[in-house]
Image (tube, rainbow, N blue to C red):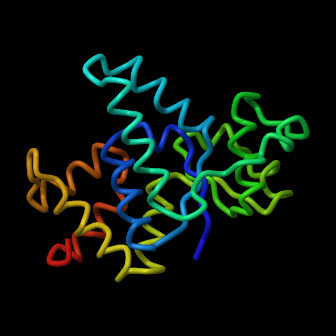
Amino acid sequence: MIVVVLDACVLYPPALRDLFMWLAAAIAYQPRWTEDIHAEWIRNVLKNKPGVTPAQLERTRLLMDRVSEDCLVTGYEKHIPTLTLPGPDDRHVLAAAIEAKSSVIVTFNLSDFPASVLRQFGVRAMHPDKYLTALLEDVPDLFLMGLKDHRASLRNPPKAVEEYLETLRINGLNRLAERLENHRSSI
């Protein structure tokens, strides 16, 4: 099973964060993040969503940290000074991938993680849409189980299949939503 570091930008949108957690619970992949990644997505949610409280996000963080064994990467800080990326603030994400022996960083910010730099560490950056579409192809039964459980968890309000697929599209997962059209009965 592939080990994947999720960047803060992927954990920021609640629909995407929840989808990744339900797929982890279905054991479709092994997610990883750090306290720094948590701090970044939480800080941005609090800044941009005034109705969300720190207590709500702390509860979410604690639940996330229980979704998968070893999901919280520690000891990565030692790699940071040796790394060079276009934005120095992104080095902690690559450092986490190195420490976790992850081959993939899932991020919307692909330009922040140049292939020429990541290649030397056996890591590649993937857009969430590309990664999730590949995951659907690699482990379709586990993926669809996690997806179905995710949709079933949505009760306020519940979402019909078409509404769920539209939520994926709104969150930048167009290719995945298109592929899932063939699996409507399994969602």
The quarter holding residue 143 reads bottom left
Using the image as rendered, state which of residue 45 and residue 59 is in the foreground: 59
Q: Residue at 39% of width from left, 67% of height from top? A: 25
Q: Residue at 8% of width from left, 59% of height from top? A: 160
The image shows residue 86, relative to residue 174, as above or below, that is: above
Looking at the image, residue 26 sits to the left or right of residue 113; the answer is: left
x, y (%) of residue 74? 71, 48
Q: Residue at 20% of width from left, 60% of height from top? A: 151
x, y (%) of residue 59? 37, 39
Quarter of the picture containing the C terminus is bottom left
x, y (%) of residue 181? 22, 70
Quarter of the picture containing the N terminus is bottom right
Looking at the image, residue 179 sits to the left or right of residue 118; the answer is: left
Using the image as rendered, state which of residue 14 and residue 85 is in the foreground: 14
The image shows residue 68, relative to residue 166, as above or below, that is: below
Looking at the image, residue 20 sits to the left or right of residue 124; the answer is: left
Using the image as rendered, state which of residue 13 and residue 32 is in the foreground: 32
